[in-house]
Image: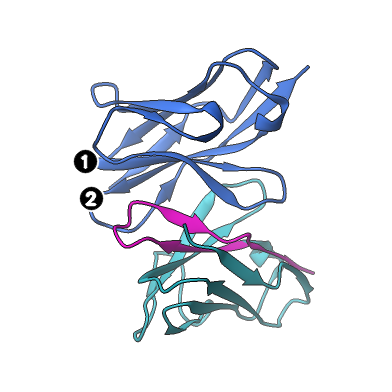
Chain colours: A cyan, B blue
Amino acid sequence: SAVISQKPSRDICQRGTSLTIQCQVDSQVTMMFWYRQQPGQSLTLIATANQGSEATYESGFVIDKFPISRPNLTFSTLTVSNMSPEDSSIYLCSVGDRGLNEQYFGPGTRLTVT
Amino acid sequence: AQSVTQLDSHVSVSEGTPVLLRCNYSSSYSPSLFWYVQHPNKGLQLLLKYTSAATLVKGINGFEAEFKKSETSFHLTKPSAHMSDAAEYFCVVRTGTASKLTFGTGTRLQVTL
């Protein structure tokens, strides 16, 4: 399995500002994903972070709001831009193994927007 | 399109009694199915997975699940609940070779003395 770390673990931000979340994996992985878990709800896929190309976004999520970088096979960032209280969520990074038979999840970043 | 339905948002059991968390799936193709557990303020942990091998899948911590194609179900069971099992459980489906996971809405398991 992969060991995934995220920074920051939590943050409280003011509306209108942006926050960049980092995801670091201890091994090279092909697929990296970003999920959102709103309070009391399930996980929703935001986008797939592709190394060397633009991220692939799910319906309802756009690059201007959630820009993603994937500079190499072990690292990715997700930025939450122009935040509003509705962006208060846990943001999770995950990675897929070679055969995509499993996905491993990071500990998450708990974001509160005031 | 793929989806999962977790039939119970909240399940409460006494310690030492059996656990049953229900999940039904919908998928156009042969699915891969997973159960993840999320303890309070902790990350997601994979409990078990079904990927077209044996239909009865054994996972960690004494959990198991049975894939029933005729019923489109993948219920999670454990013979005897422990206090440490109290957590949120997610049933998850992935279809074919696509990497996208679709999560159910979750079932909160409460274990009482």
Amino acid bearing label 2: Gly
Q: Where is residue A36, by image quadrant?
A: bottom right
Position of residue A76 measured from the top left corner of the image (x, y, whole percent): 50, 78
Where is the C terminus of chain A found, in terms of image quarters?
bottom right
Q: Which mark is residue B30?
A: 1
* Camera-side residue of B2 and B31: B31
What residue is drawn where x is 43% and y is 84%?
A72
Give the farthest residue toward the top: B17
Residue designated by label 2: B96
What residue is drawn where x is 48% and y is 56%?
A104
- Labels 2 & 1 near each other (Cβ < 8 A): yes
At label 1, counting other C-alpha atoms closer than 10 Å, the crowd grade (few under 14, some 14-19, many 20 or more) is some
Amino acid bearing label 1: Ser
- Residue A45, above or below B28: below
Magenta residues, start to end? A91-114
Protein chain holding label 2: B
Position of residue A31 measured from the top left corner of the image (x, y, whole percent): 37, 68
